[in-house]
Structure formats: C-alpha cells, structure tokens
Amino acid sequence: MSEAFLPFSRPFISREAIDEVVSCLESGWITTGPRVAQFTEDLKQYLGAPYVMTLSSATAGLHLALLTMKLEPGDEVITTPLTFAATLNTIVLAGARPVLVDIDPHTLNMDVSRIEEKITSKTRALLPVHFAGLPVDLDEIYRIANQYQLRVIEDAAHAIGTEYKGKKIGSFGDTQVFSFHPNKNMTTGEGGCVATRDAALAKQIGLLRFHGIDRESWNRFSKSGSQDYDIVLPGLKYNMMDIQAALGLHQLKELEGFIERRTELVNRYQEVLRDWPQWILPSEPSFSHRHAWHLYTPLLQEEVAGMDRNEFMERMKNKNIGTGLHYRAVHLYPYYRDQFGFQRGDFPQAEAVGDRIVSLPLFPSMTDAEQDRVIDMMYSIFPH
Ligand SMILES: *Cc1c(COP(=O)(O)O)cnc(C)c1O
C-alpha cells in the first residue's frame, strides 16, 4: 500500500478562484475593499439575510456578537459541551460564564428539552451549535428565548447551506455566525461572517471589527472618500481581506455542488456501514430539514469493536487514511474543569459521544475510489 495519505478533509479551490486571487493581488488593493463588498452582497443573497458582516473568522464573529451584549461578571450563556473550544472560549472572553446543557445522543445537538432547567436570573443568551450541519430545533430555541427574554446567537460554523423547516440558517432568527475555515463547507482560507436582521447590531459589529472607526478604510483611501474618521469605541482588528473574499466569491457559487457531493458520499457511508455492529450511525430528527453534512461522525462501539476510538484512528493513520476528532466534550479540558468546576459525569451523553466519535474523510473533491479506500481499510480492521 503505497497510496498517498488521504486527509479527512481537503478544500477544493477552482481555477477561477485561483485566478481571482491573482487578480486581487495584482489590483493594488488586497485588504478590505471591493471584493469584500461584493462577497458581502453575495452572502446576503445566498443566506437571505439583510445584514452580513464579513470577518477574519467565526471565532471573531462569536466574540463580537457576544461583546455587543455588554455581558457582566456572573452573566450566563447557555451552550453545548459537544463543540469546538471557540464556542466556550469566546463566552469567557466576552466576560460571561458558560452554562452547559447535555446533548441529545441521536442528533448530537443540544437537548432543547433540558434548556429551561438551566435558566436563571443571570442567563442572557442561548448559543446553540448546529452540529455537523444538522439544525438544532430552532422553533423550541426561539420559543424559550422569547419566553425568558434571551438573545440567541447560533454557532452556524458547520451550517452554511443548512435548512430548518424550509428556511436557510441565516435567513431568520436573531444572529448566526458562519465559518470559512478550510475544513468547513466553503472556505476563504481563514474567515467567517455574522448574519443578522438587526441594523443596530450590524453597526456595532462594523465598529468593533475595525478599531471602532466609524468609516470603512476603502472609503477613506479611495478618491471619493475622506481621510478623516472618528473613534467611537475601542475596537478590534477582525476585518476580512479582499484576498480572502476573492476565494469566497467563487466558493459560494460552488457551495450547492459541494453540499450535493458531501450528501452523496454520506449516503454511501450510511449504506455500507448500516450492518456493521461496530458503529452507531448519525441519525436525523423528524422535523423537516436539510443537513449540510460538514462532518460525517459515526460512533465506534468499543465493546463490540474490541478497540477504542483512538486506536481506530491510529490504525487508519497507519493505513494512510486521515480521520478527525470533532469533538471531545469541552468541559473536560483542564481550563474548563479548573475554572468552572466541571467534571466527568456532569454531561454523560456528551462524554460518551466525545469518547466514541470519529470523523471519516468527507470533502467535495473526494472521489468514489478514495471512498472505496476508506471503506476497504475499515473492512481490513473489522473483517466480517
Ligand atoms: C470551526 C468552528 C468555529 C470557529 O471557526 P473559525 O472560523 O475557525 O474561527 C466555531 N465553532 C465551531 C462549532 C466550529 O466548528
């Protein structure tokens, strides 16, 4: 077996996207400018969102969306333990305490039936994650948010293209944060955006993402703009560059095709693995939705498999197949254990899933032959 290493994810960058990046580099304007403006318009169209703020990452988006809430010490934000560290890190950096709700072991999303028992007088926001591109039950999230007067910030890092009951994530609700990291469903290298229907919130994010300056640099430095500006608050430096938007303009056009290919590959995995006793396969909720399939994450039943998840990942690596780990339960990482007193046993569903979950290779340019290799290697580990 001398075949090249197959990574668990690989971005597909078209010739048109590469040419656009080159044009951008040659244009004399490489930071935030006309390509970001165009990409922003395209995202508004695609998402059906009146306001879209492009940023340097989804982490920046979560941070800014939370900063606009002016959280005070002791304030609480409710989220899931089965997520990337950025979801919790930004809650802490914005000054609040993360309060966790265990997951539904079938959808791997936050168990919405257990949110209300965690609400206190200090709760300010719900921050659900659409895990792997499967939407959280948003009717229930927004019902709770309305009843208790809470903000909702959706971590939609996995969910560009996801639909809930016929509506795109980003087209309704409070605030959604998308990621364009290379592993995600579309990429700008690094990058992200916030979608919202709230003009004042969009304005605040616009200020916070660029030093608190009340005018975009493109306007200041173009011939028609003025050089003068005001600082109205202490902002950060989270703007997206035109080099990134050059990629994004083309990735967005290709996104539907990317999701279709991901879905085909997932259907094949589901069909082949259905009868394997070693695996528990992803399952979907009964409400109507479109899964964007950012990740394909079966659970390895270690008792049946005779090995744990880490050993399976190691064996696959030795056979030149990459896999991913999304995610170990976040509350068990040292910082969260020590700072907030979390321990094993607090969120048993997320812990059990976090110990067994593995992301199999899944990316839009993956060929049938590459998927065959993955499946053949899995057969060689679990002959049956
Ligand atoms: C990737 C990811 C993020 C962070 O996205 P970046 O664009 O890399 O900052 C946040 N939350 C979740 C659930 C993610 O998977």
Image: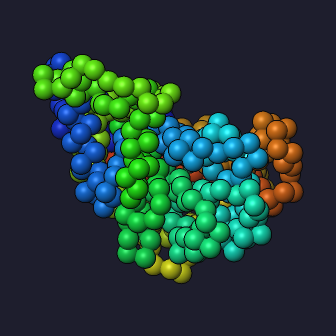
Report the side of 43 relative to 222 (left or right). right
Residue lying farthest to the left in this orientation: 223
Report the side of 232 relative to 20 (left or right). right
Q: Position of residue 369 (x, y in %)?
A: 39, 51
Identify whether 299 is placed above or below 316.
below
Q: Residue at x 47, y 60 (%)?
A: 174
Q: Could you tell me if residue 147 is visible in this image?
A: yes
The answer to which quarter of the image holds residue 340 is top right
Q: Residue at x 74, y 64 (%)?
A: 119
Report the side of 10 relative to 256 (left or right). right
Q: Residue at x 30, y 31 (%)?
A: 215
Identify whether 161 is placed above or below 26.
below
Q: Position of residue 22 (x, y in %)?
A: 20, 25
Q: Residue at x 71, y 52 (%)?
A: 76
Q: Report the quarter where the C terminus lies.
A: bottom right
In the rendered view, how is the structure colored?
A: rainbow
Q: Position of residue 376 (x, y in %)?
A: 52, 54
Report the side of 91 relative to 9 (left or right). right
Q: Position of residue 360 (x, y in %)?
A: 54, 51
Residue lying farthest to the bottom in this orientation: 286
The answer to which quarter of the image holds residue 259 is bottom left
